[in-house]
Amino acid sequence: MNNDILTHHPDGQGEVMAHAVDACVHCGFCLPACPTYALLGDEMDSPRGRIVLMKEVLEGALPLYDAAPHLDRCLGCQACVTACPSGVPYGELITSFRGWSEPQRQRSPLDRAKRAAILKILPAPRVFSLAARVGQFAKPLAPLLPNALRSPLDLLPEHVPAMQPSAAFTPARGQRRGRVAFLVGCAQQALTPNFNAATLRVLARNGIEVVIPEGQGCCGAAALHTGARDEALKLVRANLAAFNPDDFDAILSNAAGCGAGLKEYPAILHGLPDEAQARAFAAKVQDISEYLGGLLEDGELEPVLPASRPLTVAYHDACHLAHAQGVRSAPRALLRAIPGVTVLEVPEGDLCCGSAGTYNLEQPELATQLGIRKAKNILSTQPDLIASGNIGCHTQIQSHARRQGSPVPVMHTIEVLDLAYRGEL
């Protein structure tokens, strides 16, 4: 799609946006893949429509105010990227656009306060854990509260576990076969600390020593995808300073959203002096399932014990793993490597669950519709277990499955593998 964006925005982010818009041929393959288009049926709430809106705003032909509601409803799930035959990097476009446009937005005081709270609490696990515990007491009052305050309480689990600090170094068991760095993430430290504990145990069991570099922090995805670019840049550069990719075989994440965020660092820093450093860093980033899947493929993964009984596991593709990172086969292969486990495919598996980072806090009505739909589709397979690879999906699916009366456990793929190694599955 021809555009005149660089004339108006002749910087690195302008180049990113101009390239993405130029790649779109307006074919429409993205429409059926888009969750908001599926719900609303509005061309302006589709990727194709949003690309036109962003182009018009960037060229000065359309006021940002007119386009903002449709752009705010985008989950950033990148299902359109998978569907696109032209390779449009839509994720880079919407992220860059939000970073450019947010300083120009006129938001209500309540909206500004909510967004500020999200960006202060989410990246601080101890603060998040405290807020979640306080939220437990307020949860019975949720039906009486405004939607902006009710939606975060609805998503809280029934029990907030104690945090489990991860050791800075976890040695390999037996002969050392690899050395990796690990990003411990934010939300999972507060809500699901066993994600990290299981990750360290499984890696050590496979002869991989794990370093948690000092000085690491939030990956920056939440700030970046909500348009807080300056805050995101601080977090990105802090992680680039903390991780030296030359020291490790890989830099691992067990949260799909975080891993995708880490791989976005070159686009975030495009045209800036530290872009090359970001590229070297991103080249080493892998999801935990991607890394262990490589060991499995090479015949180097330690064998696991069989399940105590035949188990069916419904695997949910986290958008930022399947679409943003292109990792689909590895987690399925790891689950199938457990004797006695059958992996079930979920109807409408490519449709987002509605979590999408902070989306279920900022767009609770649409997120709830998608969460209900996702939980129904998963439960229709009648699984013994539900597995996924992202804290946001875990929280969203668990919340909506419980509301539908289901006791089926929701687990991270790495937790299932860990239980199999320990003979407890």
Image: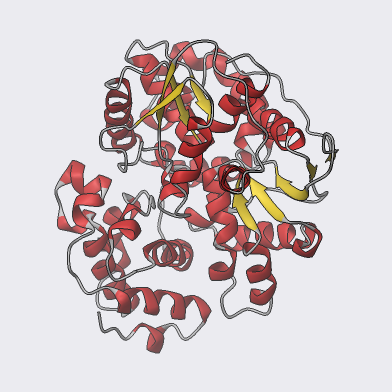
Q: Locate residue 361: give its quadrant.
A: top left
Task: Note whether residue 87 is visible.
Answer: yes
Q: Locate residue 254: give its quadrant.
A: top right
Outermost residue to the front: 299
Task: Note whether residue 144 is visible.
Answer: no
Residue 141 position, x and y percent, is 45, 13
The residue at 31%/43% (across/down) is: 350
Q: Locate residue 380: give its quadrant.
A: top left
Q: Is residue 351 found left or right of 12 in the rendered image?
A: left
Residue 69 position, x and y percent, is 28, 53
Depicted 54 relative to depicted 343: above or below: below
Depicted 132 relative to depicted 54: above or below: above
The residue at 63%/45% (across/down) is: 295
Tell which of 311 and 41 is nearer to you. Answer: 311
> Which colour assignment does the render follow?
secondary structure
The residue at 78%/40% (across/down) is: 207
Quarter placement of the C terminus: top right
Residue 129 position, x and y percent, is 66, 27
Residue 133 position, x and y percent, is 62, 19
Depicted 17 relative to depicted 341: above or below: below
Quarter placement of the N terminus: bottom left
Tell which of 197 and 307 is nearer to you. Answer: 307
How many numbered circles are shown? 0
Outermost residue to the bottom: 7
Depicted 417 relative to depicted 351: above or below: above
Q: Is residue 160 found left or right of 77 in the rendered image?
A: right
Tell which of 35 and 389 is nearer to you. Answer: 389
